[in-house]
Amino acid sequence: MTQPTTTLALALREGGYAKAPTPQVPDSLAPFLDLREVALPPLVPGQVLIEVILSPVNPSDLFFVQGGYGQPRVQGHAAGFEGVGRVIATNGADALLGQRVAFLGTGTGAWAQHAIADATLCIPLDDAVSDIDGAALIVNPLTAVALVERARSGGQAFVVNAASSQLGRLILGLARDEGLTAIAVIRRPGEEDALRDAGAAEVLVTNAPDFRAQAATVLKAHKPRVLLDAVGDQATADLFFAMPSGARWVSYGKMSDDAPSLTQMGQFIFMDKHIEGFWLSRWLPSAPADRVAAVVKQVQTRFATGTWTTRVAAELPLHQALDGILPAYATSTGKVMIRP
Ligand SMILES: NC(=O)c1ccc[n+]([C@@H]2O[C@H](COP(=O)([O-])OP(=O)(O)OC[C@H]3O[C@@H](n4cnc5c(N)ncnc54)[C@H](OP(=O)(O)O)[C@@H]3O)[C@@H](O)[C@H]2O)c1
């Protein structure tokens, strides 16, 4: 097969970082992306070329295209951190040739007909894993395993907010299977029963009138010492300050555009409380290779057996993505997938 030298992509209009803080969701993607043919650079040793099948829109993608994420944009490269596709060329990783893989778009992004990735960051997929699950098999699932491990280090019970997110649901299911008590926090009512089915022992709704009283009762009963936080708003801070001595606030996402006030600084001194961060991009290279291999196997098995599934809100072809992503994302009913 002749290797393509260009590909149709949702390409980044600017490089580097934004000059001011960015919102989680922009008003429009048009200032940040355009649909065009972009060059595919020659593969360097250890890289593969992938024909992309599906790629999800994750919250991190929306921060990234605006320049508000933890790594700089490369002008003219496709956006999109992960996806599923078939390897059509390699430079030194011939065992992957022809394989269907979950991949991280480390060479060029995944919102394109073709993407370049590092072979070491490609996961050959079992036939039992669907394209939908394969497309979102790395970013959230590996994070779920790493965060549940962190939750377990704090004891039997933990709190997780944005619990109706894809990642939140993965965390709830895994926590239940590992015998942990997960206290799910969501911002609005409606998903309580679904989250109990997914694995939550308790569900708290931050905009419910009795949220503070409910939270006090649940915290007293279960004494959670880890708060897995993807929101970062005042309700999160208030919940953390209501948790017992030794509690750790693990910030791994910033879905809220509001900054919280830290109202009880004395708790860091007198109650041994801590705030820390988690980023998969740091965890992955620092975890032992055998641990990562075991996590990848665990994750794939959970999808292959249907223990975990990926909810989909919409599937968009590339030419509809620029206008279609944000309205579909706003429904908050699952992943928006791009099918190039
Ligand atoms: N640090 C890492 O390495 C890492 C890795 C993977 C994911 N993450 C983070 O994990 C989080 C979840 O990712 P995902 O892909 O699972 O997300 P997702 O499925 O797109 O869901 C996003 C969730 O965020 C909630 N949300 C949005 N704005 C909110 C606000 N202002 N206050 C409270 N909740 C809000 C939504 O709640 P509703 O259902 O009420 O709309 C929804 O449940 C994101 O923050 C993502 O960046 C971090």
Image: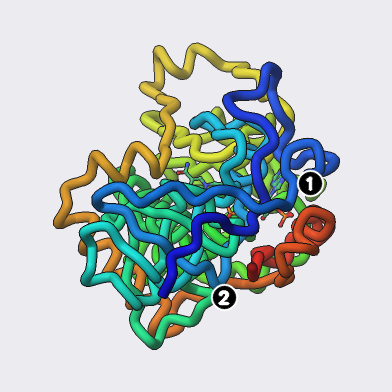
Q: Which residue is mark 2?
A: 197
For image coordinates 66% across by 72% down, the residue present is 312
In the rendered image, the quadrant that contains the C terminus is bottom right
Side of 313 relative to 98 (left or right): right
**Disc 2, SS:** helix
- Kindly tell me whether residue 58 is visible in this rendering: yes
* Circle 2: residue type: Asp
Q: Position of residue 337 (x, y in %)?
A: 65, 66
For image coordinates 52% across by 13% down, the residue present is 265
What number is the disc on residue 207? Answer: 1
In the image, residue 65 sits, relative to residue 159, either above or below, namely above
Q: Is mark 2 within 8 Å of ligand 1?
A: no
Are circles 2 and 1 on residues that touch, CB within 8 Å?
Answer: no
Q: Position of residue 188 (x, y in %)?
A: 77, 54
Which is nearer the N-term, disc 2 or disc 1? 2
In the image, residue 264 sits, relative to residue 329, either above or below, namely above
For image coordinates 78% across by 44% down, the residue present is 29
- Kindly tell me whether residue 331 is visible in this rendering: no
- Asked whether 142 or 5 is in front, the reply is 5
Sort mark 2 into few (<14), some (14-19) or many (20+) by Cα contacts within 10 Å: few
For image coordinates 40% across by 61% down, the residue present is 49
